[in-house]
Image (tube, rainbow, N blue to C red):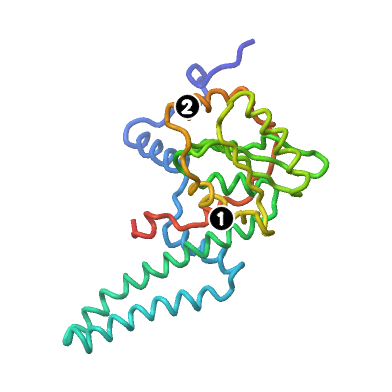
């Protein structure tokens, strides 16, 4: 026997109609809609995350803020005489802005410090590059025993292979991966980078800027052709932990403007 639906069930409670129905619908829509985090809460979260890595960050923020305000007042007292109050009012938002910029930069450092050394840190760092590069989130090569892995990025500078792990073992993996790339994209520049803190290696915090500064060697048309050919190689599609996204550690730019 088929179950009764609310439409034909005589015992079912009738759906609210009219003004009550509209109010109920609005309440339901509000409940379903995720609440946005207030800008000051975002800044506080960023500050707490940064303070864990840099406990003295509050001193630097206070010195910068009050230093700018003091300079503004002194300017109004001795240079632009009679306008000390006006300069103090103007200096407050300027000091707050300078403090927020400093906090954003320190927060980015703290976020990179948290993911440094974790599997997939190179992928998270490369993910900060917004334009001009195609980044593979999953590794293109990996040694299951030692967790050495290689990530790939494609841009006008060519193909960039970024390795995590032992440099000696990565050298063999780089060679094998470069041979694959030369078969599908002959003549394209292949750049090999190793993430680390030893000589010749690139710290994870500087990886994105390092890649972005590489000189272009491909035109836009050539880049599109190479990107199409690289699709045939694919990735390993492994569940590599991504760690912390440094960009999420930075205050929202709209929040910094008070919107």
Q: Secondary structure at mark 2?
A: helix
Residue sitting at the far left: 82
Q: Is 162 left, or right, of 83 in this rendering? A: right
Across and down, in percent, residue 39 comes to: 42, 58
Q: Nearer the viewer, residue 245 or 257?
A: 245
Name above or below for residue 182 compared with residue 31: above
Q: Is 171 left, or right, of 242 in this rendering? A: right
Q: Nearer the viewer, residue 137 or 195?
A: 195
Q: Is 256 left, or right, of 175 in this rendering? A: left
Measuring 67% from the left and 59% from the top, which residue is drawn there? 199
Across and down, in percent, residue 1 comes to: 64, 10
Residue 24: image quadrant is: top left
Say which quadrant the C terminus sits in. bottom left
Name above or below for residue 240 compared with residue 229: below
In contact (CB < 8 Å): disc 1 and disc 2: no
**Which residue bears the numbered disc 1?**
206
Q: CA distance from mark 1 to mark 2?
A: 27 Å
Across and down, in percent, residue 214 comes to: 50, 46
Name above or below for residue 238 compared with residue 114: above
| Labels 1 and 2: the sequence-earlier one | 1
Measuring 42% from the left and 66% from the top, which residue is drawn there? 100
Measuring 49% from the left and 24% from the top, which residue is drawn there? 225
Residue sitting at the far bottom: 78
Measuring 37% from the left and 34% from the top, which residue is drawn there? 21
Circle 2 packing at 10 Å, graded few (<14), some (14-19), many (20+), is few
Q: Secondary structure at mark 1?
A: helix
Across and down, in percent, residue 153 comes to: 57, 38
Residue sitting at the far right: 145
Circle 1 packing at 10 Å, graded few (<14), some (14-19), many (20+), is few
Q: Nearer the viewer, residue 165 or 6?
A: 165
**Which residue bears the numbered disc 2?**
224
């Amino acid at each position: 026997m088929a179950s009764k639906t609310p439409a034909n069930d005589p015992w079912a409670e009738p759906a609210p109609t009219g003004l009550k129905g509209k109010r109920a619908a609005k309440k339901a829509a509000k409940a379903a809609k995720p609440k946005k985090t207030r800008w000051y809460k975002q800044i506080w979260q960023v500050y707490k995350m940064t303070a864990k890595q840099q406990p003295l960050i509050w001193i630097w923020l206070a010195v910068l803020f009050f230093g700018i305000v003091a300079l503004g007042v002194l300017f109004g007292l001795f240079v632009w005489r009679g306008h000390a109050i006006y300069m103090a009012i103007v200096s407050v938002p300027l000091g707050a802005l300078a403090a927020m910029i400093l906090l954003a930069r320190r927060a980015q450092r703290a976020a990179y410090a948290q993911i440094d050394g974790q599997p997939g840190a190179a992928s998270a760092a490369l993910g900060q590059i917004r334009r001009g590069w195609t980044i593979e989130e999953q590794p293109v090569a990996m040694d299951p025993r030692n967790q050495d892995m290689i990530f790939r990025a494609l841009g006008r500078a060519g193909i960039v292979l970024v390795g995590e792990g032992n440099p000696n073992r990565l050298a063999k993996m780089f060679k094998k991966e470069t041979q694959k790339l030369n078969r599908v994209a002959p003549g394209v520049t292949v750049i090999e980078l190793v993430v680390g803190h030893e000589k010749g290696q690139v710290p994870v915090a500087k990886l994105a800027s390092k890649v972005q500064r590489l000189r272009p060697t491909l035109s836009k048309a050539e880049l599109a052709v190479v990107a199409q050919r690289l699709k045939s190689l694919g990735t390993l599609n492994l569940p590599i932990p991504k760690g912390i996204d440094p960009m999420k550690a930075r205050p929202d730019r709209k929040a910094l403007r008070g919107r």
